[in-house]
Image (cartoon, coloured by chain):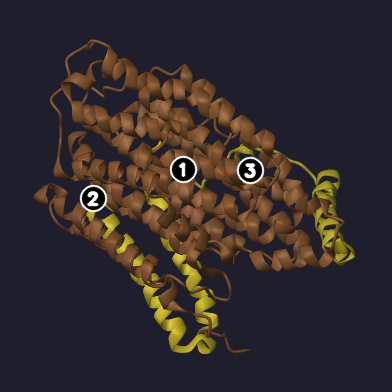
Amino acid sequence: MIQYLPILILFIIAAGFAITNIGLSAVLGRRKPTAEKLSPYECGIDPVGTARERFSVKFYLIAMIFVIFDIEVVFLYPWAVAFKELKLFGFIEMLIFVGILLVCYLYIWKRGGLEWD
Amino acid sequence: MTNVSIMTFNILSILPILVLAGFGMIVLLIDVLTSRKLGEKNLLAYLSLLGIVVAAVLSRSSIGTATFSFNETFTIDNYSIFFNLIFLLSTGLTILISHNYIKREEINYGEYYALLMFSTIGMMLMASGADLLNIYIGLEVMSISIYILTGFKRSKLISNEASLKYFLLGAFATGFLLYGIALIYGSTGTINLRQIACFIAGRGGGLDPLLILGMGLIIVGLGFKVASVPFHAWVPDVYEGAPTAITAFMSVGPKAAGFAAFLRIFMTSFAYTHHEWQKIIYILAVLTMTTGNVVAIAQTNIKRMLAYSSIAHAGYLLIALVSANNMGVSGTLFYILAYIFMNIGAFAIVIVLSRKGDEFIQINDYAGLGFKHPLLAIAMTLFMLSMAGVPPMAGFVGKFYIFSAAIKSGYVGLAVIGVINSVISVYYYLRITVIMYMKEPAREFSPLTISPLIVAAIVISVVGTLQLGIFPSKVMEIAQRSIFTLK
């Protein structure tokens, strides 16, 4: 277990750093609340209505499709880093992977997953 | 920087899986690129069957080899080939019984066939996995496809409910499995099945608590997939809600895959610690058999009854796991094959008798079937007798091997409990036969929806049930030759 000691120490330092800083700013910081400061930040525009609103389930589909193609990029980065060692083999592997995703893309497109209405 | 070794990259070893994946994607693309009405999707069903036959032929061609590939994460041996053929058989039979059913239920989408094939890929990965992570990935590929298939009747609330229940509980159970894998890695420093075995043997006695805990969690995760008590709560609801053809598939495919992984992990990696897990599996086996059989008696819905009966059959198979000898393992292979024939056969009859909007699944609906449709009634009787374990049907031979294996390993008590359970099960299996032949019809039978494909499925099931029961020696020999690479 001793080899995990540095990780424990790191945990303690990280937690201590965060707690200390938040605590210090709570103790030492000055507070002059105004109406603007207390309102939620919405890119500088005055807040409109409540955030607890219902929104279209279509966003769910968009988010799901985004995740699929986001994962593709996650795999592309390490492949790009190790490209020289993997040579042609890695290139063909990646072609197959992207090819399978292309099938997914065609499927989503033709099924109307990319259309809003 | 070292060069990445691609020496163990052996594409031939995964060729059946690749072929099946290719066919699955082709089916998906044909479905999506052509209009919805094209030939009522007959083409897709035939294409899927072709894919399954090609994969089976390719799989069969490597019988006798025992190779590792992909840095010893994947193995092809007689054991995995036997299971691959079992999975392909169950998927093929499912497509045969589905073809007409999904048209009738207006769920005739091309994704159905593609998902069946993807799920089979997952099962094949599970049977061929030589390390825990590969088995886990196979399990996920299999499960996710089946979660979707369970909810395939999109407009039916009961189907959606079944799908969601199965998904939530299944995801939770997978978490247990993954946690178990993590603990075993923490304890042994490897996820490779053979290296785990070496590590445990190398340390001699003195078991690590982490290892025991990991083993227990793996039992929970896989116990969920094979529907053993007390991880069975999802079974009746999911089996009832799912489309009937998928219920048939679910009760054979994933169960077989779960046992493939169970046997592979426990016979290869944990053979040395068998005293620890045999006690747990012993209790699970007794609970599973007894609960399944006793609760099945009270069911009035035939899908629920078959669900509990499938729980009971998982219990018999766990007996084989407890005995942990060659006879038990080969008996498991034989029993699963027999179970595929008799169970899919029984579900095929349920499908033939039902029609859209009228599932025809109360057991009393079967009254008088023996007079109205004698051939169907004879087939159903055969399947019921086989499941009850009456000679000369396949179920009898399977049970005989499994109980003998238990006695051979000294678990006489367990074998006795198994036989008693088998007797209990005779009651509810024979009740259907009695209702079919000795009661007046309670209601009109709907006109049968018979297609050549479903007739083929019933004929194959009947022949399989009888063939395995009367001439078991050939298949048994193959099963016995399939297990040498496990240890």
Residue A46 visible in rendering: no
At x 59%, y 61%, the residue is B133
At 34% across and 69% down in the image, what residue appears? B58
In terms of sequence position, does the residue under pointer 2 or pointer 1 come before the other?
A: 2
The residue that mark 2 highlights is B110
Q: Please tell me the numbered disc located at residue B406.
A: 3
Residue in view at x 87 percent, y 56 percent: B206
Above or below, B199 against B275 in this view is below
Mark nearer the N terminus (3 vs 1): 1
> Vertically, is A12 above or below A33?
below
Q: Which residue is mark 1?
A: B397
Q: Chain of mark 3?
A: B
Depth check: give the residue in front, A103 or B399.
Answer: B399
Q: Chain of mark 1?
A: B
In the picture, which chain is brown? B
Residue B222, given in percent of the width and then of the height, sits at: 58, 46
Q: Nearer the viewer, residue B140 or B263?
A: B263
**In front: mark 3 or mark 2?**
3
Place of residue B6 in the rendered image (x, y in percent of width and height, measured from the top left)? 52, 84
Q: Amino acid at mark 1?
A: Val
Label 3 to label 1: alpha-carbon separation: 14 Å
Estimate the x, y position of residue B4 in percent, counting from the top left.
Answer: 57, 85
